Each structure stands twice: as structure tokens, then as C-alpha cells.
Amino acid sequence: MPEPVSYPMKIVAHIRSDFATKFGVPRQSGLVEQLRATVVFEPEYRDPAALRGLEDFSHVWLVWVFSQAVREGWSPTVRPPRLGGNRRLGVFATRSPFRPNPIALSCVRLEGVETDPELGPVLRVSGADLVDGTPILDIKPYLPYADCRPEASGGFTDVTARVLLKVDCPEELLARVPGEKREALLGVLSNDPRPSYQADPERVYGMTFAGLEVRFQVAGERLTVVEIARA
């Protein structure tokens, strides 16, 4: 058997998103297409030639690091939140961040390749599920002929219903959110930011979004926003 080999990785970019913390980030990419984010390259990789031809693709893969979930060691089993945190599955049968290597993969829509006067070439993307500042290891184009498998089975996710919540947000509170970010916030809330195992209708939850602290309660399938203020 060959000796174990380690392969050094370089951070090629970081993402700028509206999520300062993990709480509230959609559980998968693409669930809230209204979310907008920017991929900012490290100085070493701000060469426009490296992106030549990327603008012809509608979607890209982001390969990134679970930088807020790095742990010493690993466990062969984890408790997927989608199963209520009550059932253990093999780590390689889930997308848990607690893995031997804290690497993640997200498919996002490429809204545009632009040139910033200070940052050089940047990518405008939508549907990203990354915390602000997350390091990105690589970017690859999404290839429909190879990456799309309509006949694929989804394992345990096929039998766990995805329920969108009805969001009630008073107009005077929603008005505190920048106009271009309101639909994204409502989309995030409708996807139920709470851990799956928490269902106390009296509890007030709080999440940070776009520099705002959003507080809400959930009763059944209805989410009510109770406060929106500057974080």
C-alpha cells in the first residue's frame, strides 16, 4: 500500500455574502436564488486570463472550506439535521461539515464576470450557501451534459419532506431591509433557518443578514418576524 501523502491547497478566493454567521445560511446551494454574493480573488489569482471563457457558462461549482466547522479528528457517523438530529448515518453518506477534510461543494448561478477597479476580476453569483469570508479553493464550470443526472436517487433526502414556511413580516419591519435584499431574506426565512430538532413556538430566534439582526418565531408552518434592527 502506498504511503499516505498530503497535498497542500491554496486559497484562490473568498466570498462576500450577507451571512456573518452560520445560522440562517441555506442548507444547500440554489435553494434561495435571490441571494447575491461576490467571489473576490486573492491578489495572486487576479489575472483576467484565468477566467477567460467562464462568462459563457450559466453556473459554476465552488469548492470551498468549512472554515467555521474545522475540528480535530473526525467521526465515521454524523446526525443529519434533515433527519431531526436523531439518526446516525455514515459521514460519507451526508454533506455534514464535520468530515476528515472540511471541504464543501456548491453549485451557484454565475450572474456575471466583472472588473472591480480595486479587486480586479470578480464573480457575481446567486444562490450561494456560504458565510461571508469563506475561503474558496477552486472554481469549475458546471457542465449540464456531465453534471446533471435527472434519474439520480437522493437517498434519505428523498423521504424527508422539504416544507416551505409561510412568512409573516410586517411592512414596517420589512421596510428596514434594503429593497434589493428583501426577497432574499424572505426566501431564507421560508426555508426555516432553525435546526430541525427545535420546534418551540415560544422561542425567539435571531439571525444576522446583510448587517441586520432578524428575530422571529415559528409556530407550525408559519414564521413571524418580530424585530429587524441593525446588527
Image (cartoon, grey):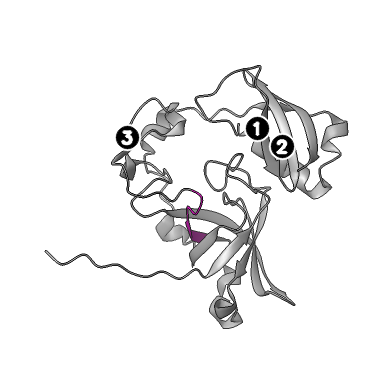
- Circles 1 and 3, Cβ within 8 Å, touching? The answer is no
- Where on the picture, by quarter, is residue 199? top right
The quadrant the N terminus occupies is bottom left
Q: CA distance from mark 3 to mark 2?
A: 31 Å
The residue beneath circle 1 is 190
Q: CA distance from mark 1 to mark 3?
A: 27 Å
The residue beneath circle 3 is 89
Left or right: 186 with respect to 175? left
The residue beneath circle 2 is 186
Q: Does dot 3 land on a helix, a strand or a loop?
A: strand
Q: Which of these two is toward me, 93 or 76?
A: 76
Q: Is residue 187 above or below residue 34?
A: above
Q: Which residues are magenta?
A: 61-68
Q: Which of these two is toward me, 218 or 23?
A: 23
Lower position in the chain sequence, tag 3 or tag 2: 3
What amino acid is found at the position of numbered circle 1 in the picture? Answer: Ser
Left or right: 72 with respect to 226? left
What amino acid is found at the position of numbered circle 3 in the picture? Answer: Leu
Q: Does dot 1 land on a helix, a strand or a loop?
A: helix
Q: Residue furthest left?
A: 1
